Image: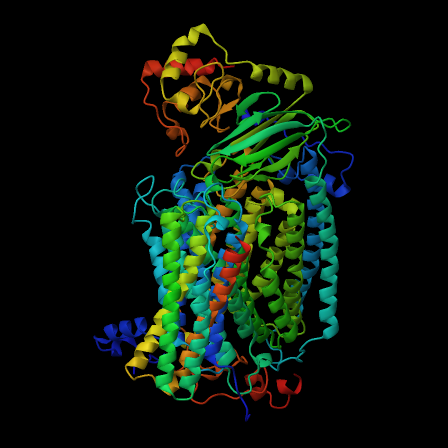
Amino acid sequence: MSFADIPSTQVASAGDSWLMRVFHRIPFLSGGPTSIFSPQATPARDIYGLSVFVLLVTLVIFLVVAGLLLYAVVRFRHRPGETDMDPTQLYGSRQIEVAWTVVPILIIVVLFLSTARIISLTERARKPANALNVVVIGHQFWWEYRYPKLGIVTANELHVPVSDPKAPTPTYMTMSSADVDHSWWVPKLAGKMDLIPNKVNVMWIDPPEPGTFLGQCAQYCGVEHAKMLIRVYADTPAEFEKWVANQQRPAVNDPAVTEGRRIFEQTACVNCHTISGTAAQGRFGPDLTHLASRDTIASGSVKNTPENLRKWIDDPDAMKPGCLMPKMNLNEHELEAITAYMASLR
Amino acid sequence: MTPTLTANETATARPQKLWQETFYSWISTVDHKRIGLLYIGYALLFLLIGGFEAMLIRIQLAVPNNHFIAPEVFNRMFTMHGTTMVFFVGMPILFGFGNYLIPLMIGARDMAFPRLNAFSFWVSAFGGLLLYYSFIGGDGLYGAGTAPDVGWFAYAPLTATLFSPGHSTDYWIVGIFLSGIGSVGTALNLVATIVCLRCKGMTMGRMPLLAWLYLVTSGLVFIAIGPLTAAQIMLLLDRYLGSHFFDAQAGGSAVLWMHFFWIFGHPEVYILVLPAFGFANEIIPVFSRKAIFGYPAMVAATVGIGFISLGVWAHHMFTVGLGPAGNTFFTLATMIIAVPTGIKIFNWLATLWGGHIHFTTPMIFSIAFLFQFLIAGLTGVMLSAAPFDWQLGNSYFVVAHFHYVLVGAILFMIFAAFYYWFPKMFGRMLSERLGKWHFWLMFIGFHLTFDFMHVPGVLGMPRRVFTYEADRGWGIWNMIATIGAFIQLAATLVFVWNLIRSYRKGELAGNDPWDAWTLEWTTSSPPPHYNFAEEPVVHSRRPLWDLKHPDQPDSDYE
Amino acid sequence: MDEWRLPDKGTVGMVCLIVAESAIFIIFVIAYIFYLGKSLSGPTPAQVLKLPIVETVCLLSSSLTVHLAVIALEKGNARLSTLWLAFTVLLGAIFLGGTALEWRELIYQDGLTIQTNLFGTTFYSLVGLHASHVVAGLLMLGLMLGFGVAGKLKQEYAHRLHMISYYWHFVDAVWVVVFTVVYVIGR
């Protein structure tokens, strides 16, 4: 699957107002893989409905006030040749002041109440018993995903089951950080939520249709903040089961790449990485047990091809300057072997 | 007694050794007018430097996956750009105008504490130089060039020694700490001056609105700078004495830094905008030929904005996990501040209404300010709705919003102030022709950059990214924004040229070139060292209006 | 325009300074309260803090003595003023000495430093910030005392001494808050 063929489906739902449908049709606003005006899950959709309402109210205010400004500037301009005498001085008017205090207050009340409702809907939603639990831990510069009840640990590519609106199976994400502040933002699914060390935040998503959703870190976290990308795969129940089963298996032990495995286990790689079923149990870097099953490496920034893999292992800093994986100074042979080993970890 | 140059003396008449005397007189001055000019000159220099940093950012972002500057350099650029513009352009320029104008407008000879005034300038100036010394001093993780790269709000724990080794963060801390001392000193001076040195007859209800705006601004400085200073002390203690204020390993809280910073940070943006409102209050009436509409309402709105601004800070933290109660409260508080702000906009509109509007350069900048501030306020209302902010927060929508306020409202109004008061300061008019060029280039460039910058935000582009993926659809909007930046650069260069040229050859201004109404226009241009030979006596808000219209003075109506 | 009297700029200025300084202190107090009970290890306030009665009595009395010094100078009695100033500086110095002794015991006997835990961090920073303001106040008062001893304290300086005394009263007021939060509520 290439980057270009991520579908940007615009699934209108029955609950959409006419205004929301209008927005759907503005291509430059709602096209693109990460537009906030193209919601694909309930939290994003709720926000979208509110946003459109707020936009409408502010648009009306803008048209009225800017219109008055334009009118005043044209109508009351001093035309050359006109009298230089100063016009009638008007110092104020209590009634007008009251009027343009009360009307904004009323508008604010309406805006506030609509907003409070959406805050409550999203943050006080009751969690169904069969929600999927995922623990998300932010690192400089990658995402760790753990599925505690399924015994799965993976990185950077999040798989979730679709959630049928009639029998919802949302994914609840418990989030924290292992180092500095990060923020998880996949616009089509939900608003962003920060990952903060020593603090646990919770958010949820429930994509009703299968698809791939893109996002990235939205809180400056250091040099490679821009390359801490997110990919979420909403799988059909069958696809998800298959994925889970694969992830639960220990690492593939292909005899053809034993050499690579041996070098891997004897180099410092094991200090940072885990490959389940081997001696590598490091926790600092991403879990590599099923690395070859992922579409991308380097936190979503490059495609997972043997060539990219080789370049990455050889000199991570060249691909992501400032990334925390050091250059291991491997020779040709070691590099070939380890790359082959990595590529075998489906 | 140092000779003051009037507009009639030419350079060739000066004897050679005068430059040392001039230099010494400037660095040892305690005259509020000179200190004001020092602040303004200093700020202009940093405006150009901060603008240069912005150009580097915009060039790097013009196309996806660009390699114009390295990520480390980019991160330093946006940190320094933000820090410079807020602390070493915005604050000094506004304090500079305040310093220059307030004593003149209230009929005083100088500020209440002239030596404190000088001290405040020099300590702030040193802070700025120290911050920029970071480019060459100390050493950091990557060696060459160690300016801070933690963002202008320096979130913990990115600023801990673990994640920011070396001294770059320390330059940020100390540079701004010093500028904070200067800010408090100047604010103290402004309050003491406004409260204690008004001329006879000038009750609080008769002083120019600019004075009210500076009074409230100063009050905000006292309350807001403290939290920043405290947080910076805590950060320094963490970095050097091993304390644990923001150390997650020991139970410290990253969110605490955010609270402390934004308790400062939000009032700070009002500190920056209120003086701009003050300029509007002086300039718009003069070029509409009408008194400001609703003076008491404007005072009340200003005080209201001041108070409310102290209670909205966590709208910068909607995505941090405050919980529904916190998010709801801060949404409400933030929306409420729109009410007094709206009142101000409506009063300005009402001032224009029924007037005779003259489109001088200060006035067209002011009208653009009104238009742009309206939009900025409305995007602010959008962001105040917490769920909307969950999508738009920390994205380029926010960057567009705050630049709309900082550039579209504040900078435009500062330009207006320059054109309006330059004649008083230097005795010569700025060129109207160059002024119009400046305005239109600035207007077009500004809108190209910042109108279209909202779109990448809506399309999912986070802020502080040194580059972005090509498949997101953000490229075209970033390119447009970059083009606009170049046009704004051209506008600024036209402005600088206008300043230089008009200083030497501008048309002589006289005391009162704009037919205005407040006390500064009674003195010569520039004013004598002592401002007023005799203490003025006033009977209304517009003493010169009364003099020019003895048949219908303001005092009859107030 | 016979009665055009505006407030005194020294008073206004000092009030502004006090507001600004209060803002800094309030943040440190908030941090202290926020982190109460959150230390992951190490000594707790209840285990190591003792009520600093003597130091507190001295510091609060020094507010009285400085007030008396101001009144004496306003009346033109420079010698009496100098005497009261001397008492003020002495009482302030005892306060600082007491703090130093307390800290020595905390560091060497109880093992509490600014690095130990959150309590150590917030305690030393808050009490230290206050102590640094006491030092600043003592420097100013010491200067006035020096003038007094040298016979140069004049009645027309009474107003300036009055402003310094405002600062000193502020320092004492902060101590009341710190004492209550740290030694009473926090223990």
Report which quarter residue A200 is drawn in. Answer: top right
Report which quarter residue B313 is drawn in. Answer: bottom right
User: In the image, is A258 to the left or to the right of A107?
Assistant: left
User: Which of the pair C81/B178 is nearer the observer?
Assistant: C81
**Res. C7 visible in picture:** yes
User: Which of the pair A120/A327 is nearer the observer?
Assistant: A120
Name the spot of residue C172 as percent of width and height, x first.
47, 68
User: In the image, is B517 to the left or to the right of A279?
Assistant: right
Q: Quadrant of the N terminus of chain A?
A: top right
User: How many discs mark residues in the rendered view?
Assistant: 0
**Res. B504 visible in picture:** no
Give the colour scheme of this rendering.
Answer: rainbow
Residue B341 position (above or below residue B5): above
Residue farthest to the left? Answer: B16
Residue farthest to the top? Answer: A255
Rendered residue at 53%/49% (across/down): C36
User: In the image, is B34 to the left or to the right of B357?
Assistant: left
Residue farthest to the bottom? Answer: C2
Rendered residue at 55%/45% (across/down): B396
Name the spot of residue B529 as percent of width and height, x first.
37, 81
Residue B556 position (above or below residue A65): below
Name the spot of residue B274 as percent of width and height, x first.
55, 65
Rendered residue at 39%/79% (across/down): C84
